[in-house]
Amino acid sequence: MALLLWRATLFSAPAFVGASLPSLNDTCIHTLDAIDYPFHNTRTLWDILLSCGLTLFACTWTAIHTHVPGMDEGMLSVAPRRLFIMVVALIAPELIITWATRQFFSARRAAKDFNTEFGTQHARACSGISEVFMGWKTIHGFFAWMGGFMLYIDGKPRATLTSDELRHFVRVGSVDMPVISEAEIEDRSKGDGLSKGIALLQLVWFVVQLVARRIQNLPITLLEIDTLAVAALTCVAYGLWWKKPKDVACPHIVNWNGRHLPSQLTYDLGIGFLDRLIYPFTSLMGIGASVSPRAARSRRVPSLGGYSNHYYATSVRLIGCFSGMVFGAIHCLGWNYLFQRPTEHMLWRAASLGIASAPALLFIYVEYWVGWRNSCVVRYIIICVALITSIIYIAARVTLVVLIMLSLRSLPLGAYDTVTWTQFVSLL
Protein backbone atom coordinates (compact mmCIF):
# COMPACT_ATOMS: atom_id res chain seq x y z
CA MET A 1 0.00 0.00 0.00
CA ALA A 2 2.83 2.40 0.82
CA LEU A 3 4.42 1.61 -2.52
CA LEU A 4 1.23 2.51 -4.37
CA LEU A 5 0.92 5.79 -2.49
CA TRP A 6 4.54 6.61 -3.29
CA ARG A 7 3.98 5.98 -7.01
CA ALA A 8 0.74 7.97 -7.00
CA THR A 9 2.65 10.92 -5.58
CA LEU A 10 5.17 10.67 -8.37
CA PHE A 11 2.51 10.47 -11.09
CA SER A 12 0.82 13.55 -9.70
CA ALA A 13 4.00 15.60 -10.24
CA PRO A 14 4.55 15.79 -14.02
CA ALA A 15 7.41 18.26 -13.67
CA PHE A 16 9.47 15.63 -11.86
CA VAL A 17 8.90 13.05 -14.60
CA GLY A 18 10.49 15.17 -17.34
CA ALA A 19 13.37 16.50 -15.26
CA SER A 20 16.92 15.16 -15.13
CA LEU A 21 18.75 14.11 -11.98
CA PRO A 22 22.37 15.24 -12.39
CA SER A 23 23.07 14.69 -8.68
CA LEU A 24 22.80 10.91 -8.88
CA ASN A 25 26.53 10.60 -9.69
CA ASP A 26 26.34 7.50 -11.88
CA THR A 27 23.80 5.78 -9.64
CA CYS A 28 21.45 3.45 -11.48
CA ILE A 29 17.81 4.47 -11.49
CA HIS A 30 15.48 1.57 -10.87
CA THR A 31 12.20 2.15 -12.68
CA LEU A 32 9.12 0.04 -12.28
CA ASP A 33 7.56 -1.85 -15.15
CA ALA A 34 3.90 -1.56 -16.06
CA ILE A 35 3.09 -4.79 -14.25
CA ASP A 36 4.11 -3.20 -10.96
CA TYR A 37 1.15 -0.82 -11.12
CA PRO A 38 -1.81 -2.73 -12.58
CA PHE A 39 -4.46 -0.17 -11.57
CA HIS A 40 -3.12 2.59 -13.81
CA ASN A 41 -3.67 2.98 -17.56
CA THR A 42 -0.41 1.54 -18.79
CA ARG A 43 1.32 0.10 -21.80
CA THR A 44 3.95 -2.60 -21.92
CA LEU A 45 7.41 -2.61 -23.45
CA TRP A 46 6.05 -4.77 -26.24
CA ASP A 47 3.44 -2.11 -26.98
CA ILE A 48 6.20 0.48 -27.41
CA LEU A 49 8.25 -1.84 -29.61
CA LEU A 50 5.23 -2.76 -31.70
CA SER A 51 4.18 0.85 -32.22
CA CYS A 52 7.67 1.91 -33.28
CA GLY A 53 8.14 -1.18 -35.41
CA LEU A 54 4.89 -0.72 -37.32
CA THR A 55 5.66 2.94 -37.93
CA LEU A 56 9.15 2.19 -39.22
CA PHE A 57 7.87 -0.62 -41.43
CA ALA A 58 5.08 1.51 -42.86
CA CYS A 59 7.46 4.38 -43.61
CA THR A 60 10.25 2.29 -45.14
CA TRP A 61 8.67 -0.67 -46.87
CA THR A 62 6.01 1.41 -48.58
CA ALA A 63 8.26 4.40 -49.23
CA ILE A 64 11.09 2.54 -50.96
CA HIS A 65 10.58 2.57 -54.75
CA THR A 66 12.92 0.07 -56.35
CA HIS A 67 13.94 0.02 -60.01
CA VAL A 68 12.73 -2.33 -62.70
CA PRO A 69 14.39 -5.73 -62.13
CA GLY A 70 16.72 -7.22 -64.71
CA MET A 71 16.06 -10.02 -67.13
CA ASP A 72 15.19 -13.33 -65.47
CA GLU A 73 15.41 -11.84 -61.96
CA GLY A 74 12.89 -13.15 -59.48
CA MET A 75 11.78 -12.30 -55.97
CA LEU A 76 14.89 -13.87 -54.43
CA SER A 77 17.05 -11.38 -56.32
CA VAL A 78 14.90 -8.29 -55.78
CA ALA A 79 14.04 -8.77 -52.07
CA PRO A 80 17.65 -8.52 -50.74
CA ARG A 81 18.18 -5.23 -52.60
CA ARG A 82 15.00 -3.81 -51.16
CA LEU A 83 15.93 -5.02 -47.68
CA PHE A 84 19.34 -3.36 -47.98
CA ILE A 85 17.77 -0.03 -48.93
CA MET A 86 15.36 -0.35 -45.98
CA VAL A 87 18.29 -0.87 -43.62
CA VAL A 88 19.99 2.23 -45.04
CA ALA A 89 16.77 4.17 -44.53
CA LEU A 90 16.72 3.12 -40.86
CA ILE A 91 20.38 3.95 -40.25
CA ALA A 92 20.95 7.03 -42.44
CA PRO A 93 17.64 8.29 -43.88
CA GLU A 94 19.30 11.49 -45.12
CA LEU A 95 21.16 9.40 -47.72
CA ILE A 96 17.82 8.11 -49.00
CA ILE A 97 16.59 11.71 -49.27
CA THR A 98 19.71 12.66 -51.25
CA TRP A 99 19.16 9.71 -53.57
CA ALA A 100 15.46 10.47 -54.01
CA THR A 101 16.17 14.17 -54.63
CA ARG A 102 18.64 13.34 -57.38
CA GLN A 103 16.10 11.04 -59.01
CA PHE A 104 13.35 13.65 -58.73
CA PHE A 105 15.41 16.35 -60.43
CA SER A 106 16.60 13.89 -63.09
CA ALA A 107 13.03 12.79 -63.83
CA ARG A 108 11.79 16.37 -64.17
CA ARG A 109 14.71 17.29 -66.41
CA ALA A 110 14.17 14.23 -68.61
CA ALA A 111 10.51 15.14 -69.15
CA LYS A 112 11.50 18.73 -69.95
CA ASP A 113 14.21 17.65 -72.42
CA PHE A 114 11.87 15.31 -74.29
CA ASN A 115 9.13 17.91 -74.47
CA THR A 116 11.56 20.60 -75.64
CA GLU A 117 13.21 18.45 -78.30
CA PHE A 118 10.30 16.47 -79.67
CA GLY A 119 7.42 18.79 -78.93
CA THR A 120 8.53 21.66 -81.17
CA GLN A 121 7.30 22.43 -84.64
CA HIS A 122 10.76 21.68 -86.03
CA ALA A 123 10.74 18.19 -84.59
CA ARG A 124 7.27 17.56 -85.89
CA ALA A 125 8.22 18.60 -89.41
CA CYS A 126 11.55 16.78 -89.54
CA SER A 127 11.10 13.59 -87.59
CA GLY A 128 7.46 12.85 -88.21
CA ILE A 129 6.80 11.83 -84.60
CA SER A 130 4.00 14.30 -83.90
CA GLU A 131 1.36 11.61 -84.24
CA VAL A 132 2.78 9.50 -81.40
CA PHE A 133 4.45 11.95 -79.03
CA MET A 134 1.89 13.37 -76.64
CA GLY A 135 4.32 14.97 -74.22
CA TRP A 136 6.13 13.61 -71.17
CA LYS A 137 5.39 14.24 -67.51
CA THR A 138 7.50 13.64 -64.44
CA ILE A 139 6.23 10.07 -64.21
CA HIS A 140 7.69 9.38 -67.67
CA GLY A 141 11.05 10.72 -66.52
CA PHE A 142 10.97 8.47 -63.46
CA PHE A 143 9.99 5.52 -65.62
CA ALA A 144 12.91 6.14 -67.98
CA TRP A 145 15.55 6.51 -65.26
CA MET A 146 14.34 3.51 -63.26
CA GLY A 147 14.88 1.17 -66.21
CA GLY A 148 11.50 1.33 -67.89
CA PHE A 149 12.82 1.12 -71.46
CA MET A 150 14.70 -1.99 -72.59
CA LEU A 151 16.49 -1.99 -75.94
CA TYR A 152 15.89 -5.07 -78.10
CA ILE A 153 18.13 -5.89 -81.08
CA ASP A 154 16.94 -8.61 -83.46
CA GLY A 155 14.34 -9.68 -80.94
CA LYS A 156 16.83 -10.11 -78.08
CA PRO A 157 17.36 -7.80 -75.08
CA ARG A 158 20.60 -5.82 -75.19
CA ALA A 159 20.49 -3.42 -72.21
CA THR A 160 18.32 -0.95 -70.37
CA LEU A 161 18.44 2.55 -71.85
CA THR A 162 19.02 5.67 -69.81
CA SER A 163 16.89 8.71 -70.52
CA ASP A 164 19.77 10.42 -72.34
CA GLU A 165 20.45 7.36 -74.52
CA LEU A 166 16.78 7.00 -75.41
CA ARG A 167 16.54 10.65 -76.40
CA HIS A 168 19.67 10.39 -78.54
CA PHE A 169 18.53 7.25 -80.36
CA VAL A 170 15.10 8.77 -81.04
CA ARG A 171 16.75 11.93 -82.36
CA VAL A 172 18.95 10.04 -84.86
CA GLY A 173 16.14 7.68 -85.83
CA SER A 174 17.67 4.48 -84.46
CA VAL A 175 14.55 3.75 -82.39
CA ASP A 176 10.97 4.93 -82.54
CA MET A 177 9.55 7.17 -79.87
CA PRO A 178 8.09 4.81 -77.23
CA VAL A 179 4.36 5.24 -77.00
CA ILE A 180 3.28 4.86 -73.38
CA SER A 181 0.77 7.04 -71.58
CA GLU A 182 0.69 8.12 -67.96
CA ALA A 183 -2.25 5.80 -67.33
CA GLU A 184 -0.31 2.82 -68.70
CA ILE A 185 2.66 3.57 -66.45
CA GLU A 186 0.39 3.91 -63.41
CA ASP A 187 -1.22 0.60 -64.34
CA ARG A 188 2.21 -1.08 -64.19
CA SER A 189 2.83 0.42 -60.74
CA LYS A 190 1.96 -1.65 -57.67
CA GLY A 191 1.50 1.40 -55.47
CA ASP A 192 -1.78 3.23 -55.10
CA GLY A 193 -3.29 6.00 -53.04
CA LEU A 194 -4.69 3.55 -50.47
CA SER A 195 -1.33 2.02 -49.53
CA LYS A 196 0.30 5.43 -49.41
CA GLY A 197 -2.55 6.80 -47.32
CA ILE A 198 -2.32 3.96 -44.79
CA ALA A 199 1.40 4.58 -44.34
CA LEU A 200 0.85 8.30 -43.81
CA LEU A 201 -2.01 7.66 -41.37
CA GLN A 202 0.26 5.37 -39.32
CA LEU A 203 2.86 8.13 -39.13
CA VAL A 204 0.27 10.79 -38.25
CA TRP A 205 -1.16 8.61 -35.48
CA PHE A 206 2.33 8.01 -34.11
CA VAL A 207 3.11 11.74 -34.08
CA VAL A 208 -0.24 12.56 -32.47
CA GLN A 209 0.52 10.15 -29.64
CA LEU A 210 3.95 11.72 -29.05
CA VAL A 211 2.49 15.23 -29.01
CA ALA A 212 -0.22 14.12 -26.60
CA ARG A 213 2.36 12.56 -24.29
CA ARG A 214 4.35 15.79 -24.37
CA ILE A 215 1.29 17.84 -23.48
CA GLN A 216 0.48 15.55 -20.54
CA ASN A 217 4.13 15.57 -19.36
CA LEU A 218 4.58 11.85 -19.99
CA PRO A 219 8.11 10.71 -20.88
CA ILE A 220 8.89 9.84 -24.48
CA THR A 221 11.34 6.97 -24.89
CA LEU A 222 14.54 7.27 -26.91
CA LEU A 223 13.26 4.61 -29.28
CA GLU A 224 10.21 6.74 -30.04
CA ILE A 225 12.40 9.79 -30.66
CA ASP A 226 14.57 7.84 -33.08
CA THR A 227 11.49 6.41 -34.79
CA LEU A 228 10.11 9.93 -35.21
CA ALA A 229 13.37 11.10 -36.80
CA VAL A 230 13.58 8.18 -39.22
CA ALA A 231 9.89 8.35 -40.16
CA ALA A 232 9.95 12.10 -40.72
CA LEU A 233 12.88 11.92 -43.13
CA THR A 234 11.57 8.82 -44.88
CA CYS A 235 8.31 10.60 -45.58
CA VAL A 236 10.27 13.39 -47.28
CA ALA A 237 11.73 10.79 -49.63
CA TYR A 238 8.20 9.41 -50.02
CA GLY A 239 7.06 12.82 -51.24
CA LEU A 240 9.92 13.06 -53.73
CA TRP A 241 9.00 9.59 -55.06
CA TRP A 242 5.28 10.28 -55.09
CA LYS A 243 5.14 10.19 -58.91
CA LYS A 244 7.65 7.37 -59.27
CA PRO A 245 6.08 4.04 -60.29
CA LYS A 246 6.38 1.42 -57.59
CA ASP A 247 7.52 -2.19 -58.06
CA VAL A 248 7.25 -2.25 -61.85
CA ALA A 249 8.07 -5.79 -62.94
CA CYS A 250 8.54 -5.51 -66.72
CA PRO A 251 10.10 -2.76 -68.89
CA HIS A 252 8.69 -1.30 -72.08
CA ILE A 253 10.35 -2.80 -75.18
CA VAL A 254 12.15 -0.46 -77.58
CA ASN A 255 13.25 -2.10 -80.86
CA TRP A 256 16.44 -1.10 -82.65
CA ASN A 257 15.96 0.25 -86.20
CA GLY A 258 19.44 1.65 -86.88
CA ARG A 259 21.86 0.40 -89.49
CA HIS A 260 24.83 0.14 -87.14
CA LEU A 261 24.70 -1.50 -83.75
CA PRO A 262 25.38 0.68 -80.70
CA SER A 263 29.01 0.38 -79.63
CA GLN A 264 28.60 0.92 -75.89
CA LEU A 265 25.68 1.50 -73.57
CA THR A 266 25.71 2.80 -70.01
CA TYR A 267 24.51 -0.41 -68.40
CA ASP A 268 26.75 -2.70 -70.42
CA LEU A 269 29.92 -2.35 -68.35
CA GLY A 270 30.55 -3.14 -64.70
CA ILE A 271 32.97 -1.69 -62.14
CA GLY A 272 36.18 -2.93 -60.57
CA PHE A 273 36.69 -4.51 -57.17
CA LEU A 274 37.75 -1.33 -55.33
CA ASP A 275 34.85 0.63 -56.76
CA ARG A 276 32.42 -1.91 -55.35
CA LEU A 277 33.43 -0.97 -51.79
CA ILE A 278 32.49 2.70 -52.15
CA TYR A 279 29.74 2.20 -54.71
CA PRO A 280 26.82 2.28 -52.20
CA PHE A 281 28.03 5.50 -50.56
CA THR A 282 28.84 7.40 -53.76
CA SER A 283 25.54 6.35 -55.33
CA LEU A 284 23.37 7.32 -52.36
CA MET A 285 25.21 10.63 -51.94
CA GLY A 286 24.59 11.43 -55.60
CA ILE A 287 28.28 11.66 -56.46
CA GLY A 288 28.05 9.00 -59.14
CA ALA A 289 26.13 5.79 -59.75
CA SER A 290 28.44 3.05 -61.01
CA VAL A 291 27.17 -0.09 -62.68
CA SER A 292 27.81 -3.17 -60.57
CA PRO A 293 28.74 -6.43 -62.34
CA ARG A 294 25.44 -8.01 -61.31
CA ALA A 295 23.51 -5.08 -62.80
CA ALA A 296 25.52 -5.33 -66.02
CA ARG A 297 24.86 -9.07 -66.31
CA SER A 298 21.14 -8.53 -65.73
CA ARG A 299 21.04 -5.56 -68.16
CA ARG A 300 19.36 -3.38 -65.57
CA VAL A 301 19.73 -0.08 -63.75
CA PRO A 302 21.97 -0.43 -60.68
CA SER A 303 19.91 -0.77 -57.52
CA LEU A 304 21.29 2.52 -56.14
CA GLY A 305 21.39 4.39 -59.46
CA GLY A 306 18.63 5.77 -61.59
CA TYR A 307 19.63 9.41 -62.01
CA SER A 308 21.85 11.80 -63.91
CA ASN A 309 24.95 13.47 -62.46
CA HIS A 310 24.60 16.65 -64.51
CA TYR A 311 21.72 18.50 -62.89
CA TYR A 312 21.29 20.49 -59.67
CA ALA A 313 24.33 19.00 -57.93
CA THR A 314 24.63 21.79 -55.36
CA SER A 315 20.90 21.76 -54.59
CA VAL A 316 20.92 17.99 -54.10
CA ARG A 317 23.87 18.13 -51.71
CA LEU A 318 22.30 21.02 -49.81
CA ILE A 319 19.00 19.18 -49.37
CA GLY A 320 20.78 16.01 -48.27
CA CYS A 321 22.98 17.82 -45.74
CA PHE A 322 20.05 19.82 -44.38
CA SER A 323 18.11 16.55 -43.93
CA GLY A 324 21.00 15.16 -41.91
CA MET A 325 21.00 18.24 -39.70
CA VAL A 326 17.25 17.85 -39.13
CA PHE A 327 17.81 14.18 -38.26
CA GLY A 328 20.27 15.16 -35.52
CA ALA A 329 18.07 18.03 -34.34
CA ILE A 330 15.11 15.68 -33.77
CA HIS A 331 17.30 13.51 -31.55
CA CYS A 332 17.96 16.61 -29.46
CA LEU A 333 14.40 16.15 -28.19
CA GLY A 334 15.97 13.70 -25.77
CA TRP A 335 18.20 16.45 -24.34
CA ASN A 336 16.62 16.23 -20.89
CA TYR A 337 15.78 12.53 -20.97
CA LEU A 338 16.04 10.76 -17.61
CA PHE A 339 19.10 8.56 -18.22
CA GLN A 340 20.35 6.07 -15.68
CA ARG A 341 23.84 7.59 -15.62
CA PRO A 342 25.10 11.11 -16.34
CA THR A 343 27.68 9.60 -18.72
CA GLU A 344 24.92 8.27 -20.96
CA HIS A 345 23.23 11.66 -20.76
CA MET A 346 26.33 13.47 -22.02
CA LEU A 347 26.93 10.88 -24.74
CA TRP A 348 23.40 11.35 -26.10
CA ARG A 349 23.80 15.11 -26.23
CA ALA A 350 27.22 14.89 -27.88
CA ALA A 351 26.04 12.33 -30.44
CA SER A 352 22.93 14.36 -31.33
CA LEU A 353 25.01 17.49 -31.85
CA GLY A 354 27.56 15.51 -33.84
CA ILE A 355 24.92 14.21 -36.26
CA ALA A 356 23.40 17.68 -36.57
CA SER A 357 26.72 19.38 -37.36
CA ALA A 358 28.55 16.74 -39.44
CA PRO A 359 26.41 17.20 -42.60
CA ALA A 360 27.15 20.93 -42.63
CA LEU A 361 30.89 20.23 -42.58
CA LEU A 362 30.49 17.66 -45.35
CA PHE A 363 28.61 20.17 -47.49
CA ILE A 364 31.37 22.71 -47.05
CA TYR A 365 33.91 20.01 -47.91
CA VAL A 366 32.20 19.08 -51.18
CA GLU A 367 31.72 22.67 -52.27
CA TYR A 368 35.31 23.65 -51.49
CA TRP A 369 36.56 20.47 -53.15
CA VAL A 370 35.01 21.66 -56.41
CA GLY A 371 36.56 25.13 -56.10
CA TRP A 372 40.00 24.14 -54.73
CA ARG A 373 40.68 20.79 -56.37
CA ASN A 374 43.72 22.24 -58.18
CA SER A 375 45.41 23.20 -54.90
CA CYS A 376 47.22 20.20 -53.39
CA VAL A 377 47.50 21.60 -49.85
CA VAL A 378 43.87 22.63 -49.60
CA ARG A 379 42.79 19.38 -51.20
CA TYR A 380 44.54 17.24 -48.58
CA ILE A 381 43.18 19.40 -45.78
CA ILE A 382 39.66 19.03 -47.11
CA ILE A 383 40.06 15.27 -47.51
CA CYS A 384 41.24 14.97 -43.91
CA VAL A 385 38.32 17.07 -42.69
CA ALA A 386 35.89 14.92 -44.68
CA LEU A 387 37.30 11.69 -43.26
CA ILE A 388 37.21 12.99 -39.70
CA THR A 389 33.67 14.28 -40.18
CA SER A 390 32.50 10.94 -41.59
CA ILE A 391 34.07 9.06 -38.68
CA ILE A 392 32.40 11.42 -36.21
CA TYR A 393 29.03 10.91 -37.87
CA ILE A 394 29.30 7.11 -37.92
CA ALA A 395 30.48 7.02 -34.31
CA ALA A 396 27.64 9.34 -33.25
CA ARG A 397 25.02 7.23 -35.00
CA VAL A 398 26.36 4.02 -33.45
CA THR A 399 26.35 5.72 -30.05
CA LEU A 400 22.70 6.68 -30.39
CA VAL A 401 21.72 3.14 -31.37
CA VAL A 402 23.61 1.66 -28.39
CA LEU A 403 22.06 4.17 -25.97
CA ILE A 404 18.59 3.40 -27.31
CA MET A 405 19.11 -0.30 -26.72
CA LEU A 406 20.49 0.30 -23.22
CA SER A 407 17.57 2.55 -22.34
CA LEU A 408 15.12 -0.31 -22.88
CA ARG A 409 16.52 -2.10 -19.83
CA SER A 410 14.77 0.29 -17.46
CA LEU A 411 12.55 3.09 -18.73
CA PRO A 412 11.80 6.24 -16.69
CA LEU A 413 8.79 6.53 -14.45
CA GLY A 414 5.71 7.35 -16.47
CA ALA A 415 7.05 5.89 -19.73
CA TYR A 416 4.56 3.04 -19.41
CA ASP A 417 1.61 5.33 -18.78
CA THR A 418 -0.76 5.81 -21.69
CA VAL A 419 -2.27 9.08 -22.83
CA THR A 420 -5.53 10.00 -21.12
CA TRP A 421 -7.55 11.01 -24.16
CA THR A 422 -10.55 11.97 -22.04
CA GLN A 423 -8.64 15.03 -20.87
CA PHE A 424 -8.61 16.36 -24.42
CA VAL A 425 -12.29 15.54 -24.87
CA SER A 426 -13.13 17.52 -21.75
CA LEU A 427 -11.40 20.56 -23.19
CA LEU A 428 -13.70 20.62 -26.22
Image (cartoon, grey):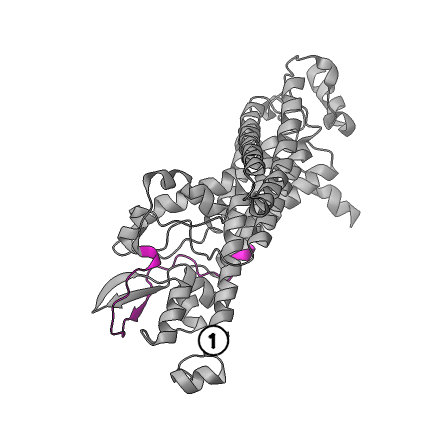
Give left or right: position of 131 versus 21.
left
Residue 400, percent from left and from top: 57, 29
Please name the residue shown 57% across and 35% down the image: 377
Q: Is residue 313 above or below residue 148?
A: above
Q: Where, by quadrant of the figure, is residue 403 drawn? A: top right
Specify whether residue 31 is in view: no
Q: Nearer the viewer, residue 236 or 60?
A: 236
Q: Is residue 185 above or below residue 131?
A: above
Q: For numbered disc 1, what is the local secondary structure?
A: helix
Please name the residue shown 33% across and 46% down the image: 271
> Seen from this angle, which residue lies furthest bottom?
125
Please name the residue shown 51% across and 53% down the image: 100
Give the main secondary structure, helix, strand or loop, of the magenta stretch: loop
Look at the image and give the residue range highlighted in magenta: 239-267
Q: Where, by quadrant of the figure, is residue 197 drawn? A: bottom right
From the image, which quarter does the N terminus lie in?
Answer: top right
Q: Is residue 128 above or below residue 256?
A: below
According to the picture, the residue beneath numbered tag 1 turns out to be 117
Kind of residue at badge 1? Glu
Q: Nearer the viewer, residue 188 or 155?
A: 155
Label 1 crowding class (10 Å Cα cut-off): few <14, some 14-19, many 20+? Answer: some
Specify whether residue 256 is in view: yes
Residue 253 part of the magenta-drawn span: yes
Q: Nearer the viewer, residue 160 or 222?
A: 160
